[in-house]
Amino acid sequence: MASPLRLSVLSPSFSPLTLLFSTSCKHSRLLSPPHASVSSSPSSSSSSTTLTPHKPFSTSLKGSFEGVKWGDLWSLNNWVVSDYYRLVDSVNGLEQSFRGLSDEQLRLKTTEFRQRLSRGETLADIQAEAFAVVREAARRTLGMRHFDVQIIGGAVLHDGCIAEMKTGEGKTLVSTLAAYLNALSGNGVHVVTVNDYLAQRDAEWMGRVHRFLGLSVGLIQRGMRADERRSNYGCDITYTNNSELGFDYLRDNLCGNKGQLVMRWPKPFHFAIVDEVDSVLIDEGRNPLLISGEANMDAARYPVAAKVAELLVRGIHYDVELKDNSVNLTEEGVALAEMVLETNDLWDENDPWARFLMNALKAKEFYRQDVQYIVRNGKALIINELTGRVEEKRRWSEGIHQAVEAKEGLQIQADSVVVAQITYQSLFKLYPKLSGMTGTAKTEEKEFLKMFQMPVIEVPTNLPNIRMDLPIQAFATARGKWEYVREEVEHMFQLGRPVLVGTTSVENSEYLSELLKDRKIPHNVLNARPKYAAREAETIAQAGRKYAITISTNMAGRGTDIILGGNPKMLAKKILEDRLLPFMTEEAPNVEIDGEQISQKGLSKIEIGPSSIALLAKAACIAKYGRKSKEDWPYQKAKLLIQESIGKSQSVDIDNLEKLLAEESELFLGDAITCAYLSVLQDCEAHCLNEGAEVKRLGGLHVIGTSLHESRRIDNQLRGRAGRQGDPGSTRFMVSLQDEMFQKFNFDTEWAVRLISRITNNEDIPIEGHTIVKQLLGLQINAEKYYFGIRKSLVEFDEVLEVQRKHVYDLRQLILTGDSESCCEHIFRYMQEVADEIVFANVDPLKSPRDWTLGKLLDEFVDIGGNCLAEQFAEIREEDMLSSLEQVHGLDFTIIDAFSLPGLPLPPKTFRGIRKKQSSLKRWLNICADDSMKNGGFRRIANFLRKYLGDVLIASYLQIVEESGYDDTYFLEIEREVIVKSLDCFWRDHLINMNRLSSAVNVRSFGHRNPLEEYKIDGCRFFISMLSATRRLTVESLFQYWSSPRNSEELFEL
């Protein structure tokens, strides 16, 4: 037999393999070529792993890699995936034995796994068995069996990597494997989606698998109460969306007491699976989550600034930079603005107009209605440019939103001040173990590796991808592009093929809709307007049917698959609502809430069988009878009943319902709806199956992209809507040289216009070919690099704040969740540090005490304790303190346990008990070991002074607390409240200062200084000052409160 082939032989020349091992220790699985056995020494975990072929090397190579492309052979991803097939073989080997278990025996496997973990086994030891259990549970509860490639996807997630799986490959089902396995530890698993709808859908749908196996499943939704959130975060597996998770973390760190916390403190984060991870960590990475409070507003200035902005002319009075959305006033613009506003200086601190005017110009140039925002009910609502959805609770900061409101003539809401903030990058870095899944991440793999140490593993498709991606067509003018889009849609409609047209804004989607209406082509629109967005799921369900034309913004890019022939479940639900709602309620649907009816023109009619018609009629009769005997139901309540009845169909005993129906027993309306739904669903499944086969023969779904995005990844998301699960399909992108991206990045389009004019006199004729495609893709890559640079800079700046935030939030949680002893020790430490700071500011150990500013030191110290210390030190003068220190300087030794400076007030006798004496001794040892004090001939005296002042401060505080007569519980409550409120007060101001600093340091680059280094230095200085101010305010407030107890709120009226 040939000598063993060692993996280390390849590593010097195979840099991607080295990169994976060096950057992701999470990926613990060994790499091996297909069908090779792996052996390693059990006593060592090093990478000197031996691959032992079963046959002579040459024969083994020939057999192992038969049919494998040489490009794939040298692909690192292929080696990783090949290794995962050993796990797949293990899971498949257990399948038959687990299939023979009863439901109860399968459920008991969860208890068995937890017991094995408690005995010292690891998750790796039980991984194959756990995956096999989940596969069998999914087969029984959902009727879905994990494919082999889905087992691989689950293993990738468990290893803390990103699983790239194409659209339609079942990422949602894949997440159940890693979620179940990691939930067995009992520390909680978060499955994070991009919106509430997907979180609820997955919790109800995939949650059935986990609940069947005995795990608890929680769901976090917008509008939930704190007690509901607390209960759901306490579950084994919690489904939520990224924004709710981030805001819950921030809100928990604004809570005033332990009872208000909703997450699993002290360790709220354990393992997360992030769905559409590229959208969350990259697309949303530039937008920090902010919790704001109202600040002093100057609303009258915004409308005035908006009027002045209308007077200024672009190119004369100001210049714009589209790439980074910046505006610069020219000298002419400054002069005109100052004249109109009747001010001598726009940047005058006492009359500051510059900020308002610059924001008004930005609102005028960069924020367009129906592109960046829509106006609804007198409010400017932001449209997420990446998802196309309206974000009602989000507002632009730094006065931009108020400037937009002034431009539109809306009521201006108050300016806001940041109370808490965090970026998604910083939020998800808090997880010890993080994984993600998406259909498009490989183009951003370097960023994931650099920022999060998460490799991207491409999971193979279950069936080959046969989609046709047609060449990009480029047009000189936008008019020509839209005409060709209309013609291609019309051509596909005549063939009967379904078409999805992707647009970049509400404005463009409605423009194309008007073009199609002129040609009388039936179609549906999906964008951020409420009348369309409310019917999102129904629109997508119809998008794969024959003759279906759908115009959509990026809303159609995530979450829901487009099934050829239609989605039978959604179609069955639509039939039930159309047939039953008129009998359940007289209230008409609200278009703003429920949306417009989906266009059915051109689509084939779904034939419902006699049994379905009878069941629908019975449900309608029950509904009509119920309406007569009771009050009329509201439309939304009636719709919710139908939805709940449909959801019950997943777990209801069908045989029992059919028996009741056959006996003509009395049925509740919900039961009748469930029976009708199941029958209608069978009819819809048969119809969709036949129509789907016909659509496949015609060529499948055709996707048209009307503009290139700033990232190839976003374009690939749109392409991925076609050709799911081996279906046929095609895509075509049509771009105009007048598109916004070309303007934003100053792309030279003159050469393309000249090229078109040489070929044809008609500028509306498209050109396509290798040269134009290469140029366009080069532009996209440049745009990706530019935005990667922005994100990288934001992450680097945020890392400074991230360290500070972690310190503050950890301190906050320690105070809120710690016991009384820890809180008391914290107060003592604060008091000693305050005393130390006073000494440091007035004492130089290199100089004699005669040169110290003892008078100033004494005044500052007395101010800390207020009346309490003022009485003790009323007769003490600077000369007295100097004399005392000179006496101490002559002493050879002193008893530190009962130490005091001669001639000065003795600390009150409150250091009784072993714990308090230990605390006093510990403080002295810390003072002696402290290297922040300079070494000098008088350092020992300075340390004695620090110890004395600290003892006096602490002992005086303990004395007035004892004399107050309050019990320990109340005493602890006040201490916690004072510390937390002091910390919050200065942390809020610190965030404002850090945001201002991040803007200010960029100017320093003109002085050849590194803005990031400047930010780090000044940010550190700000933070140290903040902590010092927090300690001082805490100590002063506690002395003030116990000297004259009052409502603690009165201490913080800022």
Image (spheres, rainbow, N blue to C red):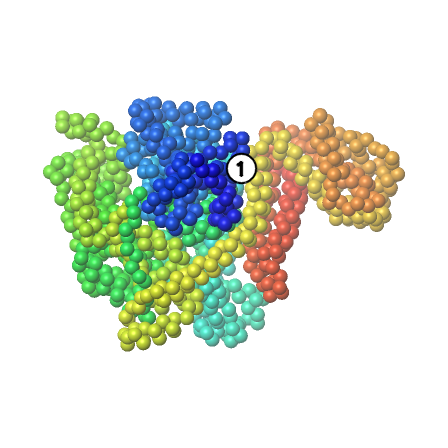
Tell me: 793 left or right of 838.
left
Image point (84%, 44%), residue name: 937
Image point (21%, 50%), residue name: 696
Image point (34%, 62%), residue name: 707
Q: Residue furthest right?
A: 890
Q: Residue furthest left?
A: 610
Q: Is residue 458 above or below residue 480?
A: above
Q: Quadrant for residue 978, please give it.
A: top right
Tell me: 418 left or right of 96.
right
Whether residue 988 is visible, yes or no, is no
Residue at which label 1 appears = 46
Q: Position of residue 49 (x, y in %)?
A: 49, 37
Q: Nearer the viewer, residue 623 or 299?
A: 623
Q: Nearer the viewer, residue 198 or 911?
A: 198
Mark 1 belongs to which amino acid? Ser
**Image quarter of the N terminus:** top left
Tell me: 460 left or right of 114.
left
Q: Position of residue 378 (x, y in %)?
A: 37, 57
SS of the residue under disc 1:
loop
Q: Residues within 10 Å of mark 1 (few under 14, many from 20)?
A: few
Whether residue 768 is visible, yes or no, is yes
Q: How many marks?
A: 1
Tell me: 808 left or right of 532.
right
Q: Is residue 279 above or below residue 156?
A: below
Q: Position of residue 1022 (x, y in %)?
A: 63, 51
Q: Position of residue 277 (x, y in %)?
A: 42, 47
Image point (32%, 42%), residue name: 170
Q: Nearer the viewer, residue 722 or 202?
A: 722
